[in-house]
Image: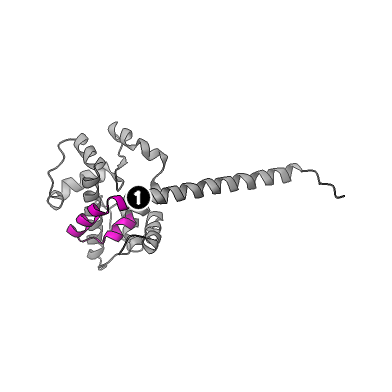
Amino acid sequence: MATMKPLTPVRACTLLVVLIALSLWRLDYRRSVVLRSFIENRLTSRYDLIEIYCTRYQVNPALYASVIAGELLCNWNELDLSDDLRAAIGADASLGFGQMRLSTANWLEQNYASLLDLSTSASRLELLERLRNDTTNIQYTVVYIHLIQREFLSVGIQVPTPVQLGSWYARGIDRDSIRIDSEYVNSVGRAAGKYFSSSLINR
């Protein structure tokens, strides 16, 4: 009858590392499945608003949905649950449906109030409330993507890809020093591209 070899410290450590890695992979996989379901529900529940504002600002609704999905897939986590509190005490947090930063929303209001067709927020608190509201958040984020499209048009690209839009949505165009680079890609852009290719939303 074969006898089992004793577990050496090295083999024990190797086995422990493998078990920990497997456990973390399973947790990450479960989180990914839950997050994707959350994103699908979030997008489909507000698709009527998405279509209204995308039609108004000439943005493909599926492109918009893919960019927002990419942003959420890469950057949303449990800490985002405290963003309202962080914003209330002065942080430049990302808020609401499309995870827009307060500074970006303020930049939009200061520079593109006529495009938004809204008066400038009278206070930081009012701006917070606008970003917490799905309707105005979707409007602001659609306008922002519309402006990113205009930046691409200025360098000769009429229809930017989901990867390009997602990358620049994450990087931001709300700084004077920023100039569009069509070759720039980041994780949000790659996630947006994958989501667009596999999206269940009708195009």
Which residue shows up at 40% across the image and 57% down it?
191
For label 1, the residue is 41
Taking 89 as reference, is 5 above or below it?
Answer: below
Displayed quadrant of residue 79: top left
Residue 65 located within the stretch drawn in magenta: yes
Which residue shows up at 21% across the image and 50% down it?
139
- SS of the residue at dot 1? helix
User: x, y (%) of residue 33?
Assistant: 46, 50
Count the marks: how many? 1
Q: 37 or 150, which is in the foreground? A: 37
Looking at the image, the residue that sits furthest to the top is: 89
Residue 181 located within the stretch drawn in magenta: no
Q: Determine if residue 40 is in view.
A: yes
User: x, y (%) of residue 133?
Assistant: 24, 42
Kindly report the secondary structure that dominates the magenta region of the rendered protein. Answer: helix
Taking 184 as reference, is 138 above or below it?
Answer: above
Disc 1 packing (10 Å; few <14; some 14–19; many ≥20): few
Looking at the image, the residue that sits furthest to the right is: 1
- Relative placement, left or right, of 200 versus 113 is right
Q: Determine if residue 144 is in view.
A: no
Q: Which residues are magenta?
A: 44-67
Which residue shows up at 64% across the image and 48% down it?
18
User: x, y (%) of residue 179?
Assistant: 28, 58
Q: Could you tell me the amino acid type at mark 1?
A: Asn
The quadrant of the rendering that contains the C terminus is bottom left
- Relative placement, left or right, of 117 versus 128 is left
- Relative placement, left or right, of 99 versus 120 is right
Q: 35 or 79, which is in the foreground? A: 35
Which residue shows up at 40% across the image and 59% down it?
190
User: x, y (%) of residue 142?
Assistant: 24, 54
